[in-house]
Amino acid sequence: MRIALLGGTGDIGEGLALRWAFDTNHEILIGSRDPGRAREKAAEYETELDSRGVECDVLGFGNEMAADRADVVVLAVPAYHAEDTVEAVRDRLDEDTILVSPGVGMKRDDDGFHYNRPSAGSVTELVADAAPEDVPVVGAFQNLSADRLANLDVELDLDTLVVGDDRDAKGTVTMLAERIEGLRALDAGPLSVAAEVEALTPLLINLALNNRGMHDVGVTFL
Amino acid sequence: MRIALLGGTGDIGEGLALRWAFDTNHEILIGSRDPGRAREKAAEYETELDSRGVECDVLGFGNEMAADRADVVVLAVPAYHAEDTVEAVRDRLDEDTILVSPGVGMKRDDDGFHYNRPSAGSVTELVADAAPEDVPVVGAFQNLSADRLANLDVELDLDTLVVGDDRDAKGTVTMLAERIEGLRALDAGPLSVAAEVEALTPLLINLALNNRGMHDVGVTFL
């Protein structure tokens, strides 16, 4: 399968790219608004993987080209760029492309981080509204620490939550998530309950701010 | 210490009463709008504890009397009764009483459970607004399954999150939470980030609805 990480040059995109390249044989495409930057980071990831004995091609493209070539397109961009990134690639998406939203809207004040709920209900629903109607949208990977994901020396031992209305697309994303070692994917329900999943991220950051040794805190459900 | 569980005749109140009576020597007071019902449930809890070799007095009172006698008052009532319960006992509270809010406002539709954010920002802040100004308010125990808590045969192995603006009160509630075996208390920040803590409860219920074997699911952060 071909997985494109739009905005794959930064934080969560890097983590997912490295983990999938390390743990699976899926083809990883790094997308960026700047194709040169995408190629540069893709080469960096290849070097990192090569140093761990994993030979694989990680390729860099402009976001449009990356989306065009992929079966699964992950919007690894800041939440406030989710909508315009979908607009930029919407002609490259169709019913056979799964669009994955890991984004969370947050605001910060002196007390810590707060969930900033978009008027669409959640970032995932905002993405679904912006995407062509026949493109299945799935929310996932919202609550993972980018640093922990990107550090291949660290065992994850974490859960990620999957939301969506398309059963098959959700199944595919669940399978892809669980191919990452130490990651378990749980079904959190349809798109309309995505806000509760996204709201967990500011909570995790608040825990990191207020408790010693929880810098890259994640969550498990049991 | 004397801990009053207002609304201690139902779900989360029962669980906290049994766990504290079982794991500590604190005095447990069960409060209810109906003092007879409180005495009846208190006797039931005593029988349950007695059958496990724990001899202790669990006493039942009207909510006002229970609040009057306690050092820590837990509002173990449904969220929509939190405000009027505080109103009913506010004359019995003072700066030496810690008021604890485990409540969460939720609404349900065909898609699952959603966080129903009160205009005060959260149930915890609603309680703080209703309480006399000098009474310290702490949010805690919002994300615990009542059934799992009430079943003393089950190891908890869970986290609970504590929010509040009063450092000492927060410390006391953290200590009381951690006296329950298998429960770890984490600092989630000040009162103003209580919404993110409360929003985790509908998420847990959605996970229970959508995943096999997660009936009484709880959470740990790591």
Image (spheres, coloured by chain):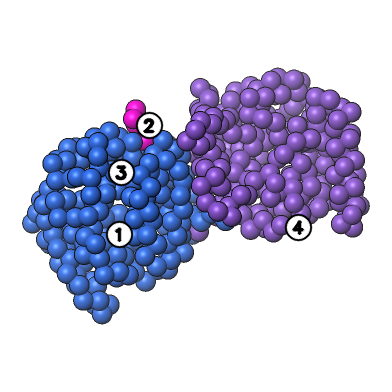
Chain colours: A blue, B purple
Chain ID for label 2?
A
Residue farthest along the bottom direction in this orientation: A53
Measure the C-alpha gap from mark 4 to mark 1.
40 Å
Instruction: Kindly identify which residue carries mark 4.
Output: B153
Residue visible at 30% across and 43% down?
A137
Residue at mark 3 to residue at mark 4: CA–CA distance: 42 Å
- What is the secondary structure assignment of the residue under circle 2? loop
Q: In the picture provided, is A87 more to the left or to the right than B204?
A: left
What residue is pinned by disc 1?
A16
Query: Separation of disc 1 and disc 2 at Cα?
Result: 25 Å
The image position of residue B84, as x and y in percent, is 69, 20
The magenta segment is A117-123
Q: Label 3 is placed on what type of residue?
A: Val
Q: Are marks 4 and 1 in contact (CB under 8 Å)?
A: no
The amino acid at mark 2 is Gly
> Residue at label 3?
A137
Other-residue count near label 3 (Cα within 10 Å), few / some / many at <14 / 14–19 / ≥20: many
Upstream in sequence: badge 1 or badge 2 = 1
Chain for numbered disc 4: B
Residue A152 screen position, x and y as percent: 34, 69
* Amino acid identity at mark 1: Leu
Q: Residue A177, relative to residue A90: is it above or below?
A: below
- Left or right of B146 on screen, residue A63: left
